[in-house]
Image (cartoon, rainbow, N blue to C red):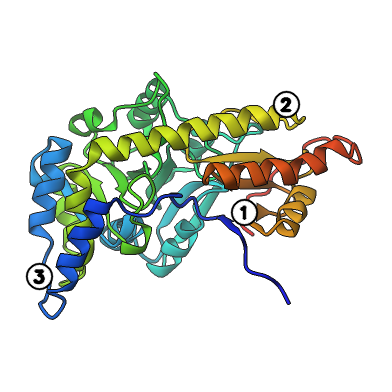
Amino acid sequence: MNLPALHQLALNESPYPPLPSVRKAMRRAVAQAHRYPQFYPDDLTERVAAWCQVSPDHVVIGSGSVGVALQLLQSVAGPGDTVAYAWRTFDAYPLLADMVGAGADPVPLTADGSQDLNALLAALDHRTRVVVLCNPHNPTGTLVTADALSAFLRQVPPHVVVLLDEAYVEFARDAELPNALTLLGDHPNLLVLRTFSKAYGLAALRIGYGLGTPDLVARIRRQQLPFGINAVATAAVEASLRATGELRRRVDTVIAERDRLHDRLLQHGWHIRPGHANSVWLAAPDPVDDAAAALTAARIHARHYPGEGLRLTIGSREANDAVLAALAHVTASGAYHRRPVRGRSRQMS
């Protein structure tokens, strides 16, 4: 019989439960569960807008960031259209394209796990309605710099919406991180996508938001499901916005653990690059399949892409130490030989 995992490190979840003040707000909301939430999430929209220092007509709320992404695709794409994105990336994007009847146009990552912006631009044509950038990238944790993003946006045709997925932006502290909100005025085809699932630890409550120009946001809001944002989730987000200092300290701890795990794995012989999300990316030709087997044996659940890579969510210190112990056996064996990197296929798996 397979035992349940001791450490769940596959979905880039926060290792922390909601803050006590957030749980208290959730309990108050549960006591009113016999009442409907707002028809549309207008109050939450206003609070998020004030927090982001934009007007409410720049904000759209959805069921997680993936819900906002679906609303965008429903508003701009359909049969005969295409959605371009780097691959590998967040698994939902090809699924969302299929849900609206659009074709998927995956573009291979570069050898170092970065999104190939020139190749993405070359993939855009008259059928393309959306191009997705994930920054920091999921699953590799690489970063599109401010200069690179500005140059990319200037070259995207106006009929193509750029969906900039910043689900992990709170974990990026690089000096070259773009300030995407400053770009909205010059790029009416840009939607910045964010979530309360990762850094804010509210993954189960499904709240995300998009930031764009009023015209684009108005189109996306037409796909808003009435009563679609529940009151418990709303209360949790509002309480979280009042506790940004505490949450920032939690993020700082995750970043410190990410850097510690990265440095220790380097010492153990892994050839990995710095990441900017709440995860560490191990890539072939290092022995990622052996590593996945070792983690499974240690009852650690990580995200394994066979023959390609292994994404390790940053967990508690105990969980991260368990990862290091399991992977030390893989690298210490010396039983593998480095192989040349194989060319990446554009076909999804």
Residue flagged by tag 1: what amino acid is it? Ala
Image x and y of residue 235, in percent: 17, 59
Judge whether residue 161 can be spotted in this image: yes
Q: Residue at x 37, y 44 (%)?
A: 199
Q: Classify 10 Å Cα crowding around label 1: few (below 14), some (14-19), many (20 and above).
A: many
Mark 1 vs mark 2, foreground winner is 2
Residue bearing mark 2: 267
Q: Quadrant of residue 39?
A: bottom left
Residue bearing mark 3: 39
Residue flagged by tag 2: what amino acid is it? Gln
Residue flagged by tag 3: what amino acid is it? Phe
Whether residues under marks 3 and 2 lie with C-beta atoms below 8 angstroms apart, the answer is no
Q: CA distance from mark 1 to mark 2?
A: 21 Å
Helix, strand or loop for disc 3: loop
Residue bearing mark 1: 302
**Label whose residue precedes the other's in the sequence (1 or 2):** 2
Q: Classify 10 Å Cα crowding around label 3: few (below 14), some (14-19), many (20 and above).
A: few
Q: CA distance from mark 3 to mark 1?
A: 39 Å
Q: Classify 10 Å Cα crowding around label 2: few (below 14), some (14-19), many (20 and above).
A: few
Q: Taking 301 as reference, is 90 left or right?
A: left
